[in-house]
Amino acid sequence: MADHDDSAGQQDSERRRRRATFLRELNEARELRERVQPRRARAARMRRQMRMRTFRW
């Protein structure tokens, strides 16, 4: 039973590591897009802010 827990822990840490890598690359891609297309990125940011303002919790 301990082997199962250990492998599950390894899988979980591997999944977390992959997710962190993915999020880091996603963030880099977003920053690159903002540098390449500042106007479009600014418009997207404004739309996202408006969506958050009008969203009801």
Image (tube, rainbow, N blue to C red):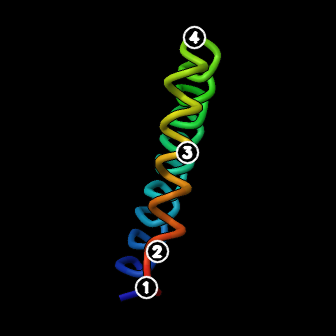
Disc tally is 4
Q: Residue at x 46, y 74 (%)?
A: 6
x, y percent for residue 3: 39, 77
Separation of residues labelled 1 and 4 (CA atoms)? 51 Å
Q: Earlier in the sequence, mark 1 or mark 4?
A: 1
**Residue 38 higher or lower than 8, as above or below:** above
Contact, mark 1 vs mark 4 (Cβ under 8 Å): no
* Residue 2: mark: 1
x, y percent for residue 8: 39, 72
**Residue 30 higher or lower than 20, as above or below:** above
Badge 4 crowding class, 10 Å Cα cut-off, few under 14, some 14 to 19, many 20 or more, is few
Contact, mark 2 vs mark 3 (Cβ under 8 Å): no
Separation of residues labelled 3 and 4 (CA atoms)? 17 Å
Badge 3 crowding class, 10 Å Cα cut-off, few under 14, some 14 to 19, many 20 or more, is few
Residue, disc 2: 6
Residue, disc 4: 36
Amino acid type, callout 3:
Met
Separation of residues labelled 3 and 1 (CA atoms)? 51 Å
Amino acid type, callout 4:
Val
Q: Residue at x 46, y 71 (%)?
A: 54
Amino acid type, callout 2:
Asp
Q: Name the secondary structure under disc 4.
A: helix
Q: Nearer the viewer, mark 3 or mark 4?
A: 3
Contact, mark 2 vs mark 1 (Cβ under 8 Å): yes
Q: Residue at x 61, y 19 (%)?
A: 38
